[in-house]
Amino acid sequence: MDIPRESAIRKRRIRRLVYVVVGLLAVGSVTLGLSRLKPAAPSVDKATVWVDTVKRGPMLLQVRGLGSLVPEEILWIPAITDGRVVRRSILPGTLVEANTTIIELSNPEQEQAALDAEWQVKAAEAQSKSLKAQLDSLLLDQKAAAATVQSDFTEAKLNAEKDAELAKFGLGSELNAKVTRAKAEALATRSDIEKQRLAVTAASVKAQLDAQQARVEQLHALYELKKSQLDSLRVHAGAEGVLQELSVEVGQRVTAGTILAKVAQPTHLKAQLKIPETQAKDIQIGQLASIDTRNGIMPGHVMRVDPSVINGTRTVDVKLDGSLPKGAVPDLSVEGTIELENLKDVIYVGRPAFGQPNSTVGIFKIEEDGKGAGRAQVKLGRASVNSVEILSGLQPGDKVVLSDMSAWDAFNRIRLE
């Protein structure tokens, strides 16, 4: 009677073990299946994303940068000499002429130096006049002496000729003729010497007067320098324009070379743009540009590209073509667009909110039914301000999402509602 009972218990145990194994297998299978399931595609409001269509055709390659209007020419006005500011005649923003007084300085030492130089010039001029009078008198004395010797020589020559004639006809002594002839010859020699002495004296007089005149001119030049330094204490604009800056205050002490003010011509402005260094490499002088002054768009062309990079940007100067719009003043903030190249036949799309030129990015391409979008690997080429070249991954007519989709980086598909 015990054998059948043990057999029934054994069967029940086996049945329970089978149930446990089957249950464990079922649980494992479900777990494995769930682990292999892809996450459900998230829903995205279609009205909140930016959708564009891939096109084929010409694409204008452009770069854009912010900047400001600056004068083409700026006149920086430095202090010519040391001084103290005693008056600011006008304030920034005032129209000025070349002779408009901007600042008045004071320097007693400079005033004294100019006065001393003036008196030195007057003393040298008086000394020059006195020396000229003395030398003129000396020259006249020498001329008189030369004239006297010349007269004596002429008289002796005539006497010698007379005695020679008398001796020839026996009316006079031959000895007397020889004496008078010797005297005439001596006076001739002396006359030549006096002429040479007169020439030397005249040259000496000229040399002394030239030396004195040079001294006078030297002192006069020094006086003009001191006078110009004194006049420079009254600082003028130096050119027609608008006073942009006034860098000193009344009572301030300034040294020579200190910048006092800045004058610019408001009618001659250029746009100075800051372009990212990665985009500025293709900019060339002469390329067309357009400048948005917020009160009109002005055409222009690139006139200079700064070779240095500052804070990741390069400075590009654009010359404005045409008349300035109303409200265009120095330091006005502007936005500029420079045309680099006109690509004739390329595949392009609006520039996405992510991805750099010449890189590969994942872009959601909208499916034909418009209810979903799948991620496609797209190779980008050259980029413009509002568009980018497509090298591979998309075809003309494809619709893509250009909005920032970083929130759905974990999904390869989204549903559009």
Image (cartoon, rainbow, N blue to C red):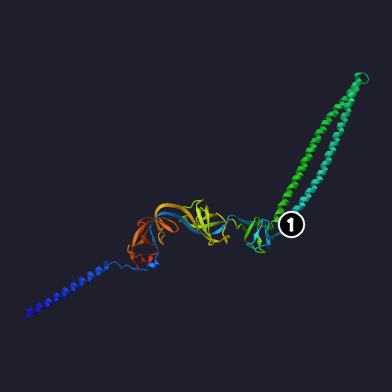
Identify the amino acid type marked 1. Gln
The quarter holding residue 61 reads bottom left
Residue 137 position, x and y percent, is 84, 41
The quarter holding residue 2 reads bottom left
Q: As drawn, is 246 to the left or to the right of 364? A: right
Residue at horizontal 74 percent and vertical 52 percent from the top = 117
The quarter holding residue 397 reads bottom left
Asked whether residue 158 is in view, the answer is yes
Q: As drawn, is 251 to the left or to the right of 184? A: left
Residue 153 position, x and y percent, is 87, 29
- Judging by the rendered image, the residue that carries numbered circle 1 is 112
- Taking depth in this image into account, of 39 and 221 the one nearest to the observer is 39
Give the quarter of the figure containing the C terminus: bottom left
> Farthest bottom residue?
1
Q: Is residue 55 above or below residue 194?
A: below
> Farthest left residue?
1
Asked whether residue 258 is in view, the answer is no
Circle 1 packing at 10 Å, graded few (<14), some (14-19), many (20+), is few
Residue 400 position, x and y percent, is 37, 61
Give the quarter of the figure containing the N terminus: bottom left
Residue 381 position, x and y percent, is 40, 55
Q: Say which element carries label 1.
A: helix
- Taking depth in this image into account, of 342 and 209 the one nearest to the observer is 342
Residue at horizontal 14 percent and vertical 75 percent from the top = 15
Q: As drawn, is 155 to the left or to the right of 380? A: right
Q: As drawn, is 46 to the left or to the right of 312? A: left
